[in-house]
Image: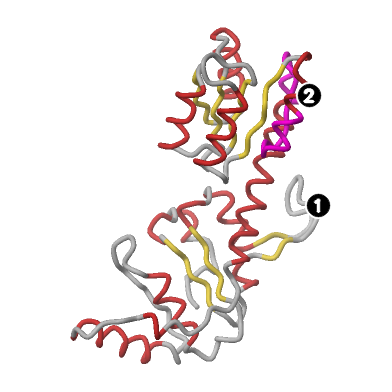
Amino acid sequence: MKPSSLLLVDDDTAFRQVMAGELNRLGYEVDAVGTGEEAIRRVATAEPDVVLLDLHLPTMGGIETLKAILAAAPATEIIMLTGHGSIDTAIESIRIGAFDYVVKPCPLDELQIRVQRAIERRALRQRANLLERGLTPPDLGNSFIGESPEFRRLMNLIDRVAPSDSTVLITGETGAGKERVAKLIHARSSRRSRPFVVVECAALQESLLQSELFGHERGAFTGADHAKPGLFEVANSGTIFLDEIGEVSPAIREIPPIHFYR
């Protein structure tokens, strides 16, 4: 199981090193930097699940850094680190888009609770985005334009596959239009009135992907205080599009009864 990723941004070297070590010990994958500029560069190359951001930073302040991170990685949750004299500014950061704030020095167990809540909200937001994309798509056939023999073969193949209940594997380079083809197959099938659910396999951690696909019953594990339907259940009688299925680990693919079908 891939650990949740954290980016710790604080110009206090001693605090940064100690806190990064403690968070690593708790099982998180931690990166730590001392400036807002470096934080923005790290977020751009590897979007973390949660950023722990000090409000007072040299050159580029915490609020400015917060805005830049939100613009670069809107799915990342941000927890502000602040002193007792900056509570008003920390509250303002929440209005801007931060998830929460903690006052330094903060007990490690309290910080862990805040981090876990941020991770849970990120997962819920990802799920909401998936379900929003599950609305029945229109027939996009008119937006497919081409005259080449290869294009006509593709459209003919779509029309042949759409009425069937067969599993469909769509291959192609990034940007080739695989999701658009999947939506057209769905729109021309007998399932067109049922949901079309997109699962971005590469965007979800392995542990979250299993829970999202199959759901769970209340009490299935610690913290499962209610039943949650999986996306296979949400897509029942419709179509589920597993984007970047090659990124799914062998451990997930071997879990019965997954067959990756529509």
Q: Residue at x 47, y 61 (%)?
A: 254
| Extent of the magenta region | 91-110
Q: Describe the element under mark 1 as helix, strand or loop.
A: loop
- Please say if 60 is above or below 212: above
Image position, residue 45 (x, y; %): 40, 37
Whole-angstrom CA distance, mark 1 to mark 2, is: 34 Å
* Residue 84 part of the magenta-drawn span: no
Quadrant of the image occupied by residue 220: bottom right
Ranked by sequence position, the earlier of labels 1 and 2 is 2
Q: Which residue is tagged 2?
A: 88
Q: Residue at x 53, y 91 (%)?
A: 190
What residue type is disc 2 on?
A: Asp
- What is the number of the mark on residue 225? 1
* Residue 92 part of the magenta-drawn span: yes
Q: Nearer the viewer, residue 262 or 73?
A: 73
Mark 1 and mark 2 in contact? Answer it, CB < 8 Å: no
Q: Nearer the viewer, residue 28 or 123?
A: 123
